[in-house]
Amino acid sequence: MANESDLIDLLFGGMEKLGPGSEADTLLVLNLLPRRDFHLVVDAGCGSGRQTLTLAKALGVIIHAVDIHEPFLNHLLRRAGEAGVKQFVQVYCMDMKDIPARFHDIDLLWSEGAAYSIGFSNALTTWASAINQNGFAVISELSWLRQKVPDAVQDFFTSGYPDMRSVQQNIKVAQEAGYEVLATHKLPEKTWVDGYYDILEQRAQALADHEDPSVRDFACETLKEIEIFEQAEGSYGYVFYVLRRV
Ligand SMILES: C[S@@+](CC[C@H](N)C(=O)[O-])C[C@H]1O[C@@H](n2cnc3c(N)ncnc32)[C@H](O)[C@@H]1O
């Protein structure tokens, strides 16, 4: 039986994008911030660094990239070298919940598609102590977009992500955690498919008959997630929350 790390490498290894998003959307959201003179920037759950590279190029300061899965960080370092921004990327193999123990006075904490792994509300509260007053947190989070949700979609997330909230509920969570909400931005559906689900679906299909049942199960869960996305009728999406620490 493959362990969790092996499963992740089999399905996601080498991918340049590990969740919905795009360089254009990262830049669009960066431009929503009222300033960009940042000294300490942390990218939590950076993965193979799609947004890390975008931030490094746009800001020209070191992006401190945190992830728990070392192969992703090695991939990010290779990509940073190829992109000519290695001097702006520093990696840390650690749990994002420990960010306050490692970093102080953060000016900008960025996290795309990753905060859910320690819980959106918990992530905001945990990171607040490490972010400067008037510093920023920019976090994307899976969110309900409509009240009318197809039954299959509701059932999938009731077991898969029971903590998923509406945009209004997440705004309230952010305010209660000590942030002012400056803006939100919903990722276009295209950014789920291009370079992410289009690649992942083919990989998962190729692994769906694997001899190891743990690989088969992982592949089938992924195919189910993609099928649910196709049936969603816009009922959920990834939303950026652009926050200022108060
Ligand atoms: C869906 S991927 C998103 C990666 C990247 N931000 C992107 O959009 O391509 C989530 C990332 O969070 C990382 N991760 C999950 N739990 C973590 C934790 N507790 N601490 C640090 N990283 C974590 C995973 O290894 C993975 O790289």
Image (cartoon, rainbow, N blue to C red):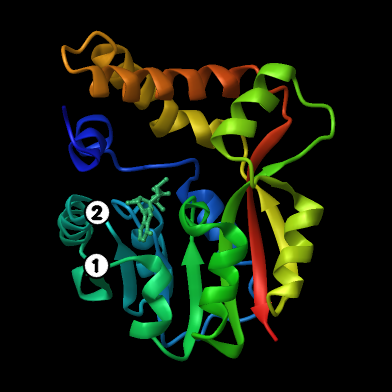
Q: Position of residue 26 (x, y in %)?
A: 52, 56
Q: Residue at x 72, y 29 (%)?
A: 234
Left or right, residue 10 beside residue 16 = left
Tell whether label 2 touches label 1 (CB within 8 Å).
Answer: no
Quadrant hosting residue 97? bottom left
Residue 224 in the image: above or below residue 32: above
Residue 110 location (% of width, % of height): 49, 67
Q: Position of residue 138 (x, y in %)?
A: 57, 66
Residue at the image position 81 percent from the left and 35 percent from the top: 146
Instruction: Report the quarter where the C terminus lies.
Output: bottom right
Nearer to us in this view, 242 or 60: 242
Q: Is label 2's Cβ within 8 Å of ligand 1?
A: yes
The residue located at (39%, 32%) in the rendering is 195
The disc placed on residue 112 is: none
Could you tell me residue 80's position as x and y percent?
22, 60
Q: Seen from this angle, which residue lies furthest top? A: 209
Q: Nearer the viewer, residue 36 or 63?
A: 63
**Is label 1 in a helix, a strand or a loop?**
loop
User: Mark 2 sits on what residue?
Assistant: 69
Count of numbered circles on the image? 2
Categorize mark 1 by other alpha carbons within 10 Å: few (<14), some (14-19), many (20+): some
Amino acid residing under circle 1? Val
Residue 238 picture quarter: top right
Tell me which amino acid carries mark 2: His
Please tell me whether mark 1 or mark 2 is closer to you in this view: 2
Between discs 1 and 2, the one toward the N terminus: 2
Instruction: Pick the quarter of the image with the N terminus.
Output: top left
The residue carrying mark 1 is: 85
Which quadrant would residue 28 be assigned to in this image?
A: bottom right
- How far apart are labels 1 and 2 at the CA level? 21 Å
